[in-house]
């Protein structure tokens, strides 16, 4: 890589260190995934900060957003929520308890399954998640402003291809 062509980032330094001690290694994958991991961590921290003034963690936002995307009446079963969020039912229960105490969702019996429950977004939860998604998108747009629209679209396409290849 020509250091004059691109500014150096921490991943470049790591790759250079590996090249010095193990010149036989092909570190191309490290260059990609090292940046993906660092971006994920940095953006996760920024998203936490965006949701914090609203009294939400990222995990709590994810529950409310999943219900919001379900469209009216914004209702899913705990099992559907767990599957979508890749959480155990135990992990989901703690989040649901906290969000229910805050008045952001309610649990009620499933009319089609006496043993089941339905989780529904309340009006307060709907208002909060709509504000939170706006705050999160503003943070994401700010981060993407380093790229032009064509570059952002190309990056999204490439990441989609990579993600799909890992899920086969």
Image: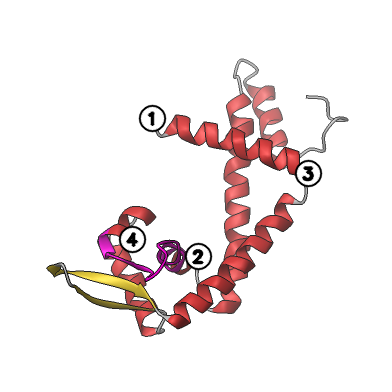
Q: Can see residue 86? A: no
* Disc ID at residue 148: 3
Q: Quadrant of the N terminus?
A: top right
> Which sits earlier in the primary sequence, circle 3 or circle 4?
4
> Which sits earlier in the primary sequence, circle 1 or circle 3?
3
Counting other residues with Cα less than 10 Å from the Cα at mark 2, is it few (<14), some (14-19), or many (20 or more)?
some
> Which sits earlier in the primary sequence, circle 4 or circle 1?
4
- Select label 2 or label 4 by which is in front: 4
The picture places residue 105, in percent across and down from the top left corner, at 37, 77
Observer-nearest residue: 56 or 154? 154
> Which sits earlier in the primary sequence, circle 2 or circle 1?
2
Task: Answer with the quarter of the image where residue 140 lies.
Answer: bottom right
Q: Which residues are magenta?
A: 62-79
- Residue at the disc numbered 2: 58
* Horizontal arrangement in the rendering, residue 135 relative to residue 80 (left or right): right
Name the residue at 38% across, 69% down.
74
* Disc ID at residue 151: none
- Residue at the disc numbered 4: 81
Name the residue at 29% across, 69% down.
93
Q: CA distance from mark 2 to mark 3?
A: 27 Å
Observer-nearest residue: 160 or 22? 160
> Which sits earlier in the primary sequence, circle 2 or circle 4?
2
Observer-nearest residue: 145 or 37? 145
- Residue at the disc numbered 1: 168
- For this orientation, the residue located farthest to the top is 24
**Element at label 2:** helix
Q: CA distance from mark 1 to mark 3?
A: 31 Å
Up/down of 104 relative to 150, above or below: below
Up/down of 127 relative to 135, above or below: below
Name the residue at 62% across, 25% down.
28
The picture places residue 127, in percent across and down from the top left corner, at 52, 78
Q: Can see residue 165? A: yes
């Amino acid at each position: 890589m020509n250091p004059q062509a691109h500014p150096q980032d921490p991943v470049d330094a790591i790759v250079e260190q590996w090249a010095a001690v193990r010149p036989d290694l092909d570190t191309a994958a490290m260059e990609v995934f090292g940046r993906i991991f660092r971006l994920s961590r940095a953006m996760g921290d920024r998203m936490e900060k965006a949701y914090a003034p609203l009294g939400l963690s990222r995990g709590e936002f994810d529950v409310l957003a999943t219900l919001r995307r379900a469209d009216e009446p914004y209702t899913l079963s705990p099992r559907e929520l767990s599957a979508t969020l890749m959480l155990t039912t135990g992990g989901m229960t703690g989040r649901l308890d906290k969000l229910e105490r805050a008045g952001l969702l309610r649990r009620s019996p499933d009319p089609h399954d006496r043993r089941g429950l339905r989780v529904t977004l309340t009006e307060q939860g709907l208002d909060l998640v709509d504000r939170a998604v706006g705050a999160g998108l503003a943070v994401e747009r700010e981060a993407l402003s380093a790229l032009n629209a064509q570059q952002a679209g190309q990056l999204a396409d490439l990441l989609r291809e990579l993600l799909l290849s890992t899920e086969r």
